[in-house]
Image (cartoon, grey):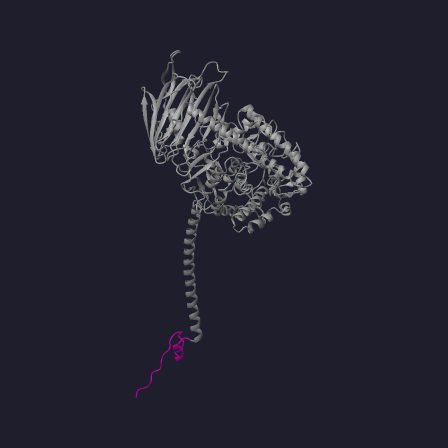
Amino acid sequence: MGRQRKRVVTGDAPPYSRRDERPSALNRKEKKKKTDFGKLFINISIGLCIFSLIWFFYAVYMRSSLSKRVVTLHPSPRVLDANSTTAKVSSERFWGSYRPQVYFGMKTRSPRSVVTGMMWMRQFSNSDMNLRHTCEQGDRLQGYGWLMHDGLTFGVQEIRDNDFTLTTEYVKRVGGDHGGDWTWRITAKQHSSAPQPPVISLMFYAAADTQGSLQTHMEEKNRLASITGFSEELGNFKITFRKPVTGELSSTKYASYNYLQTLSPGLEKLTDIVKLSLNRRFVFSPPSGEKRHYIGVDTYKPPHHQNQQKAADPRKESDFVVHQVTVQTPFQIEVLFESGSFYNRPNQLVGSIMTQELERRKAEFNAKFEKIFGLESKGFSQTHIKFAKAALSNMLGGMGYFYGESVVQSVYNEYPLLYPGGALFTAVPSRSFFPRGFLWDEGFHQLLLSKWDPQLTREAIGHWFDLMNIEGWIPREQILGDEARSKVPAEFIVQRNENANPPTLFLALQELIEQLSSKSDEAAAKPTLPFLRRLFPRLKTWFEWYNTTQTGPKPNSYRWRGRDKDTNLYLNPKTLTSGLDDYPRASHPSADERHVDLHCWMALSSGIMASIAQLLGEPHQDYKVLHDVLRDNNLLNDLHWSEQLRAFSDYGNHTQNVSLQREKVYVPPGQPRHQFPVARLVRSVRRAPKLQYVNALGYVSLFPFLLQILQPDSPKLEHILRDMRDPTKLWTPFGLRSLSKTDPLYMERNTEHDPPYWRGPVWININYLAVRALYHYGNTKGPYQEKAADLYKELRTNIINNVYAQFVETGYIWEQYNDGTGRGQGSHPFTGWSSLTVLMMAEHY
């Protein structure tokens, strides 16, 4: 048997051992732990990656979803049926003067209506071009506006140009399936101061808006006798242009005629198309007068810009027909619209037949006006009553029907979006300057219109709420359609969904509820209850939107969103959303602000919400609890009473030590100044702001009184009444000024280009609320009842006298009134909330 070999171990290798053939238990555990940690790390990494991807896609989805909310309409059933404005459902309101932006025109309440209108120009004048069409302050007319208008069947308007007056009258007659007939009568008379009877060209037109067709029918070479047409809403129709006469029973008067038949890409282009078609080659040759060349419509030649690449207008072009008649004053012309489906009309609505109809409607208007407002029984003169009728008629004649898409944006949208297309039937503040819908103006408008026609108010409110999105937001300025958009500066077109406006529609709803409970006119008020039932789902969402998006830093406090952020250029950054624009707020906008006017609007709104909910049998307790909290005078004092000012005030990051200074621009010696930037006015802050009461005495300070939140026995009421009557603060012979004369920002410019707006002038809407509140406190038992009653009489008289005097002197009702002279200023005519003077005359609050 051989000898056993020995194993030779070399180097540093450990000696062989059987136990070394397997790792120790400790080693195995360490190895396993390392493996587990690695796996865990990998799993965590994978998990984090998956989570990140999920979160990323979720964020993308949420952002996409949130970005769509701003243009997603509210899901509840519409307040108004989709066909509520059609001729079959609402034939009386189908046709109307729903084009407030033009001096005279009519359309239907349908999205793509055939529109009709009138332009005019004086021939042989010193100026080459004085074409009038859209209401423009630059036309410097002596006055224009409706003298009588019932909102339904007729209207009488007077337009005073420089040396002649045009009276535009229309009467409607319902019949057939498409809204029936109407007739216009235009009467022209020279002013006594005119050296000779002026020669005037009237241009009557019809224009299709992407649908419908128009055909011309000529006689006597170039006289357009009539237009026939067809559209989906109107069926077949005919427009007849009668010849001018001196009076109703007189013979035809000499006239020259022209016509234009072309296409238009949009209604906002009509004026330009007419201007570009004018030619001086035509001769006016009356039998007993000299021959003279006059300006008439000829062939339309679109403008050609040499070396300028301009994209073609992508819109569909539509028929546009103009009938021009040139005639010497005095004269009268009638234009007749006849519906093809009105088969059993008794006669044509022209001549003496129209006169009879017009006189009948005038008599009905006068009787209704006195029944509602009772101004004769109150002892007002006939000239005062004529003024009041004009104020109401201009608001009724300023009702517009608009259709289009707002341009909106939220924080989740990089670029503005188009809101879903929608219709709006609304009054407008000013036919010349603001011929579109404004949310907070409309609540004041409907306070007056609801007295005259509650159904009109229900329809207007319904249209506004049908424009609400899923969040409960209603764009505060409605710029619908190209025609409306053409009148608005670009910086005001985009509406942002965090921005509110005072919820004044609650004032109009409050009036409808009171009419319902008083049963003064049961037939007119009866539809209000089913209307409120349809409105309520949207009304709840609207209220909740305010109550969640406009909250302040403290419980039960509120803050307007949307203040100007570029504080360097504004003396005091504006708060357009409050409706009071440049009224002084905290000098440095921040989330710490508390706004007393918004607090009061919410107190009022919650109370009206409780009333409506209770009326409908809906849960109302939450609204009632919130109303009780917000109207608690102790809370109001804690949040907004400034002991320093002895008045209610906003709170925020504020300093009064600010001014506008011309910035310094260094120009090196010898360098031309024009090569360097223009020195701007910028804000200089001389003392750092701090959290404090703003201490600006004015309209905002009065809101607890204006909206009747204050208890009749509140000592704060005494301070308010004293400040109101102080001529060094708010009192003027013309109404309450918007900002105290003692305030550092009184009548101060806000920027280089912005004159003072709500910093001193007298505004009628706030003065109406003041008169209304004085009437309330003057008829409610309390220590200040007598003082309030005396102030009521004095303030009411001052406002009525001044607005009336300015109307007589200037021919207009104005946007605001100078607090030093009472003179009307701002945009005109402003027959929006300034027409509330009628309610003060009637003492209807």
Where residue 828 sits: x, y (%)? 51, 28
Where residue 477 sits: x, y (%)? 48, 38
Q: Is residue 671 visible in the rendered structure shown here?
A: no
Relative to residue 311, is residue 805 drawn left or right?
A: right
Give the magenta part as a residue range.
1-23
Where residue 796 sits: x, y (%)? 61, 32
Residue 574 image-quadrant placement: top right
Q: Is residue 6 magenta?
A: yes
Residue lying at the far left in this picture: please name it.
1
- Above or below residue 845? Residue 829 is above
Residue lying at the far bottom in this picture: please name it.
1
Quadrant for the N terminus, please: bottom left
Q: Nearer the viewer, residue 173 or 144?
A: 173
Q: Nearer the viewer, residue 719 or 513?
A: 513
Tell me the chief SS of the magenta region: loop
- Above or below residue 151? Residue 643 is below
- Above or below residue 785? Residue 218 is above
Relative to residue 13, is residue 836 drawn left or right?
A: right
Relative to residue 706, is residue 1 drawn left or right?
A: left
- Above or below residue 454? Residue 255 is above
Quadrant for the C terminus, please: top right
Relative to residue 440, is residue 251 drawn left or right?
A: left
Q: Is residue 280 magenta?
A: no
Count of numbered marks: 0
Q: Nearer the viewer, residue 773 or 571?
A: 773
Where residue 572 sits: x, y (%)? 57, 37
Q: Is residue 293 visible in the rendered structure shown here?
A: yes
Residue lying at the far right in this picture: please name it.
783
